[in-house]
Structures are given as C-alpha cells and as structure tokens.
Amino acid sequence: MAKARLLAPWVDEERRSAIYHCVSRVVDRAYKFGDVEREQFVKYMRMYEAFCGVRVLSFCVMSNHFHILVEVPPRMDEELSDEALLDRLSLICSKDYVEVIRMRLTALAESTTEKGKVAYAELREQFTKRMWDLGHFMKTLKQRFTRWYNANNGRKGTLWEARYKSVLVEDGHAARVMAAYIDLNPVRAGMIKDSKDYRWCSYAEAVAGGKRGELSRRGLARVMQERDNQGEINTAYDGWVGFPTPEHYGWRSVAQRYRLILFEDGEEVINMQGKRLRRGFSKEEREAEEERCGELSLAEKLRCRTRYFVDGGVIGGKRFVSDVVGRLKGGYLKEDRKSSGSRVPDYKETDGGLWSMRELG
C-alpha cells in the first residue's frame, strides 16, 4: 500500500504556506509532448492554479515529464462568497454548467430548512475542498490534461507513470536552488543552450513578458524574496503570506539576480580527465555573465519576445486586434472569451504600439 503523501506538518494548524517541488512522468517515460502538448499543459496549469488558489513559483514542461514548484497557502479563514466561488469555477467549467450551479446556490441559500442549509453547505464544499490543497491541484491538472491528450490522440487509459512525486521545500535558499534546478532542465538535457530560449519554463516565460509572463515574474520574485517575518499575513493579497505584487518588486533586479543563479548552478561539471559529467554552461560563459551582472541586452530581450510575432493569431494595433477578435467570437473563438489581446512588450511605437492575440483556440 502506498504511503500517505508527505505534507507540511503545519498544514491546517498554522497560518503559513508550504512550498513543494512536484514531478510527474509519462508512462514508460515515452517522449509524447511536442510543442502543442507543452503549450496546452501550461494553459491548464495556469487555469487550475487560479481555481485552486495555489501559486506556481517555477515550472518546466519537458518531452516526457514536468516539474512544478508550487506554493500552497493556508486555507482562508473567511469563506469565499458565492460570487467569488462561481468566478473561480468559470475558469475550468463551461458557462452553462456555472449557470446551473449559480441557480442551485441561489435557491439553497434562501432555504430556511435544516435540510436546505446542509445541502447548500455540501454544494459549496464540493468545490472548495479542491482549493488550497496540493493533492487536488495536481490530481485535477493531470486528469484534465489526460482527457485532452487522449481525445486528441485517439487513446484511452492513464497517461502518467504512477503518482506524482513531491518534496517539501524550505522557503528561501532551498526554494531558489530548486527553482533554478527546474529552469535548468532543458539546458541539462542538451535541448537548448540557455533557459531563456525554452518557452515552456518559468524563466523564459518571465523574460518574454506579456500577461502570462507576469505570472512567472511574480513567481520568481517570490522565490527571490527574503522573508524574515514568516508568520505575518499580507492582507493586500487575498490573505496570502508575503506574496509580491508588481508594485512591490523590480523585475529588472530580480531577473539579473536570478540569471546569475542559473549560470552559477548550471555550470557544467568536468572531471580530471576532461570528460564532461554534466551538461551546462562553460566556466567562460559563467564568468562572462557575471561580468555583465546578468543583464540581458535589449536585442536579447526582444529576441525572446519574438514568439508574439510567430505565435500570435492576430497582430496589429489595439483597435485592429480587438475588432478581429470581436468578429471571430461565436465561431472560431468561444462566445464568452474575455481577452481581446495584449501589448507586445518592449515594442513601443506611435499609435499605441503593437498588440497580439495569442492562443486563439
């Protein structure tokens, strides 16, 4: 019988978050994930991150496995309002299903009988029990991706090798080392020379910027954050303990310091005979990066963001992109799609700059 999964001993006892490094591999470790699969996995990861109320600090999706460094906050003392609950549910469920739940909640909330009150509490618990919980986050994410993958590849059955593995990680130095280890995976595998060029890891996503890049920036800023007041509650962020908001960190400084950590931790290992035991950056590359203090040139930053020009389904001025997206709703796009585009980072011209609509499906 499998042992119960190790969770932080303070869960449900202290107002304190916990950080875990989670890994899961494909059955037989087969290389099943191409660009489309990795992109879809990241999309689902962000959906369930928001629904479950956890925070992905660092991640990397490889060809046959993934790594996620995730912070799980304590459960909220105050219950989510019904409206807030429905907002979260709308992230992972259809509009029609959410409307059915809305009507049921409204009807039960007005009940004056004991049976009605119990039914109301049970309906809410059906969804809230999946929040602020590592197991439910990982389970629902993997199940959702499996359904999508099987449907698109004409297969049945499990996609993943056994249960996911998780390691409890101490905040601070250990979390920074783990985040760098995760972002260095494609470098160690020899897939690319620099993590900034592998779009399915947190560092590359953060450098690329944009709406999704902002989430990775906040995650890495949290990893780099020094926290002496572990138990102090930051009520400015939904009761979360010390999670940085864009107003409270400077991405340029975070990016430089984190990049230096990547090059220090990612240096290749060579034995006395000159044989390389572990792929990574050469000593000369590390020293060159230290010389420029981890600062990417403008050309490098823009090159990291070219995905907006090759992956964007629509690109142009804000008005143009919004108009096209509006015309596509109800046909090529879902009728209830909220996003109408985002500014291409660091590309500022007259007439409002350039905007892009990505992930049209």
Image: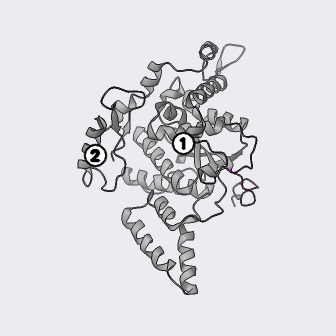
Write the residue at 59% across / 36% down. Answer: 220
Q: Which mark is residue 359?
A: none
Q: Look at discs 2 and 1 and give the one toward the viewer.
A: 2
Label pair 2/1, CB-CB below 8 angstroms: no
Q: Over which residues does the magenta segment extend?
A: 7-17
Picture coordinates of residue 359, whole percent (x, y): 36, 43
Packing grade of label 1 (10 A; few <14, some 14-19, many >=20) is many
Q: Can you see residue 33?
A: no
Q: Quadrant of residue 306?
A: top left
Q: Which mark is residue 325?
A: 2
- Dot 1: what SS? strand
Q: Which mark is residue 65?
A: 1
Write the residue at 46% across / 52% down. Answer: 145
Q: Quadrant of residue 176?
A: top right
Write the residue at 66% across / 62% down. Answer: 77
The N terminus appears in which quarter of the rendering? bottom right
**How many dots with numbers?**
2
Q: Which is the main secondary structure of the residues drawn in magenta?
A: loop
Name the residue type under label 1: His
Q: Can you see residue 193?
A: yes
Please tell me which residue lies in front, 4 or 290: 290
| The magenta stretch spans residue 183 | no
- Dot 2: what SS? helix
Please tell me which residue lies in front, 117 or 290: 117
Picture coordinates of residue 261, whole percent (x, y): 65, 26
Please tell me which residue lies in front, 262 or 354: 354
In three-dimensional space, the C-alpha distance between marks 2 and 1, rounded to whole angstroms, equals 34 Å
Please tell me which residue lies in front, 90 or 106: 106
